[in-house]
Image (cartoon, rainbow, N blue to C red):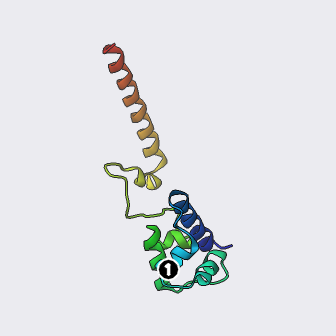
Amino acid sequence: MDKFSTRLKEEREKLKTQDPKWTQEYVAYKLGVARTTYTAYENGTKQPPLDTVTKIADIFNVSTDYLSGRSDIKNPEKKPEGRFFHDLDHASDEDLDKLEEYFKFLQEQKKKRENRNK
């Protein structure tokens, strides 16, 4: 199975654990294709056209790059609110070391405050 079909099946099955309606039949209906066609997408025996890939990405709220295996980030536009962690992949080792030191410092300060308040 290629990356696309694997991720396609994983995303649908993940949703199905939360809501049993997420069957192959249901996704096929949402895409406007036959269930056998959608099953072929999940099995990797048929590749969907680009416009269908885009619809699939929209249905599962992931990027087309994630589905195709070009990225491991499911939805790059969806960034954690008020956090910068999505930028850490691009930080230098030196910056990460400084960040770790600062985080330890903050933890120590928190412990000191908690001890004073006891």
The image shows a total of numbered marks equal to 1
Name which residue lies at 65% across and 73% down. 2
What residue lies at 51% left-to-right and 57% top-to-bottom? Answer: 18
Q: Position of residue 83 (x, y in %)?
A: 35, 48
Amino acid type at image mark 1: Tyr
- The quarter of the picture where the C terminus appears is top left
Is residue 7 shown above or below 48? above
Q: Is residue 4 left or right of residue 73?
A: right
Q: Which residue occupies 63% across, 84% down?
A: 46
What residue is shown with label 1? 29
- The answer to whether residue 34 is left or right of residue 58 is right
- Are there few (<14), some (14-19), or many (20+) residues within 10 Å of tag 1? few
Tag 1's secondary structure? helix
- Residue 86 figure quarter: bottom left
Q: In x, y percent, where is residue 65?
A: 50, 72
- Residue in the picture at 62% in, 83% down: 36
Image position, residue 102 (x, y; %)? 39, 35
Image quarter (top left, top right, bottom left or bottom right) of the N terminus? bottom right
Q: Is residue 76 above or below residue 92?
A: below
Residues 87 and 72: in front is 72
Viewer-side residue, 78 vs 93: 78
Query: In which quarter of the view is residue 14 placed?
Result: bottom right
Nearest to the observer: residue 48 or residue 92: 48
Residue 40 location (% of width, % of height): 64, 81
Instruction: Please identify the quarter of the rendering in which residue 108 is found.
Output: top left
